[in-house]
Image: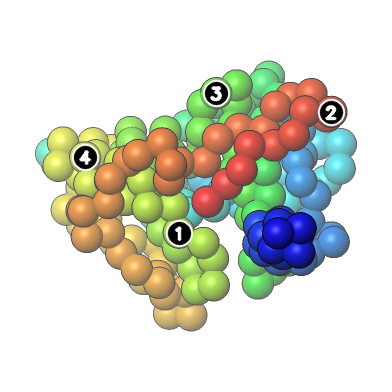
Amino acid sequence: MKVITISMILLALAPMGSLGQARSSDIPRQIFGKVQVIDGTTFEFIKSRQLVRLAGFEAPRLKQVATSDGITWPAGEVTRAWMILRTLGQDVNCAPIGRDTNNNLIAHCFVGETNLAETAIAEGIGYAFNYPNEPQIPAYFDFERRARGLGLGIWSSADLSPPWLNNVSQVPVEQSDGQAQASEAHRPHPCPSFPTAPCPSRE
């Protein structure tokens, strides 16, 4: 009985060990502070000079323009301005999950309890999107479907092409099928602002 109990404990701990090994040693568990917005998806932390790109999110390129009801507007600049307004004077709390091909961190980022990528997608500011080998956030596709159905932001323009079509080397792993459910289990949650508090588990 004692041998069986010890074996069960070891099996239970095995997945935790594999998760720990999956995180590279050069990826911090948390970055916190003021940021300089670069574009709609990327910003730089002022103190560390670390570039961070939002996970599961894409936005119009800075030079892209859109037309809604006959009115032309700078879609890329609007997305950047939205991100500036959300982060200006605020501490941004990021939980990195990996690095992209440019070696920039990919992270879930929050201002308070507000998930920046999720909120931007829900308001029609950008797209739910996954580059190859990057983890999916299924709930984001459901927020995108709702924004598209309401014709919010980028979805009000029929002539605005997705930004990844401007670069043939950047192809989405899977586009939204409108079926993902925005359940709490599939949504990123912010790390506590206190360094001694553990980050919540992430899918």
> Which residue position is annotated with label 3?
113
Q: Would you say the residues marked 4 and 2 are in contact, meaning their CB atoms lie under 8 Å apart? A: no
Quarter of the figure with residue 150: top left
Q: Residue at x 41, y 36 (%)?
A: 184
Q: Nearer the viewer, mark 3 or mark 2?
A: 2
**Amino acid, disc 1:** Gln
**Is residue 31 shown left or right of residue 64?**
right
Label 3 element class:
loop
Q: Nearer the viewer, mark 4 or mark 1?
A: 1
- Residue at far bottom of view: 169
> Which residue position is annotated with label 1?
136
Nearer-N-terminus badge (3/4): 3
Label 4 element class:
helix
Nearer-N-terminus badge (4/2): 4
Q: Residues within 10 Å of mark 2 (few under 14, many from 20)?
A: few
In the picture, the disc for residue 146 is 4
C-alpha separation, residue under disc 3 versus residue under disc 4: 21 Å
C-alpha separation, residue under disc 3 versus residue under disc 1: 21 Å
Q: Nearer the viewer, mark 3 or mark 4?
A: 3
**Amino acid, disc 4:** Arg
Q: Residue at x 77, y 28 (%)?
A: 197
Placement of the N terminus among the 4 image quadrants: bottom right
Label 2 element class:
loop
In the picture, the disc for residue 196 is 2
**Amino acid, disc 3:** Glu
Q: Is residue 39 visible?
A: no
Asked whether 139 or 46 is in front, the reply is: 139
Nearer-N-terminus badge (4/1): 1
C-alpha separation, residue under disc 2 versus residue under disc 1: 28 Å
Q: Nearer the viewer, mark 4 or mark 2?
A: 2
